[in-house]
Amino acid sequence: MSLPPCPNCQSEYVYQDQANFVCPECAYEWNPQEVAEEDVIKVKDANGTLLSEGDRVTLAKDLKVKGSSLVLKIGTKAVVRRIVEGKDHQLDCKVDGAGEMMVTAQFVKKA
């Protein structure tokens, strides 16, 4: 049986104590179900609706594409491929007519 390494110190000497995992090196205890729920990145659109991978969204305002003269118009449709953690761009989208690009979540609305 293979247990995951300690999320605190990356030690491989982890043992299970009922529902929790315990690291003998740093004495860190965690519940694997709670850690899995905390790892989910929560991103909200311009209206405050939670977005998830696979959602269809539309642009809420005109956006200039960096390094290009292309302007994405308001109402352009896109599909969220994945959600990433970042300050500038949280959504990896496939935008109609423009291809794949990263988009900031506050500039889209769930369709």
Image: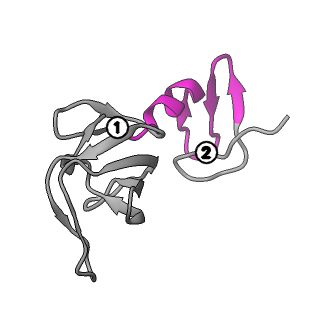
Q: Please rate how many residues cluster around mark 2, counting C-alpha atoms within 10 Å: few if below 14, some from 14 to 19, many from 20.
A: many
In this picture, which residue range is highlighted in magenta? 15-42
- What amino acid is at disc 2? Cys
* In-image side of 29 versus 100 (left or right): right
Measure how far apart labels 2 and 1 are at the Cα level. 24 Å
43, 11: nearer the viewer: 43
- Image coordinates of residue 45 in percent, x first then y, are 23, 39
Q: Please give the residue where the numbered disc 2 appears in the rendered image.
A: 6
- Image coordinates of residue 78 in percent, x first then y, are 37, 49
Circle 1 SS class? loop
Q: Residue at x 74, y 38 (%)?
A: 3
Residue 63 vertical placement versus 42 (above, below): below
Q: Please give the residue where the numbered disc 1 appears in the rendered image.
A: 42
Q: Is residue 38 magenta?
A: yes
Q: Residue at x 25, y 77 (%)?
A: 66
Quadrant containing the C terminus is top left
84, 101: nearer the viewer: 101
Name the image quarter holding residue 62.
bottom left
Q: Residue at x 30, y 58 (%)?
A: 103
Residue 53 vertical placement versus 31 (above, below): below
1, 80: nearer the viewer: 80
- What amino acid is at disc 1? Lys
Quadrant containing the N terminus is top right
Question: Mark 2 or mark 1, which is nearer to you?
Answer: 1
Residue found at the far front of this picture: 97
Which circle marks residue 22 in the picture? none
102, 5: nearer the viewer: 102
Q: Is residue 34 magenta?
A: yes
Residue found at the far right of this picture: 1
Circle 2 SS class? loop
Name the image quarter holding residue 13.
top right
- Image coordinates of residue 15 in percent, x first then y, are 72, 33
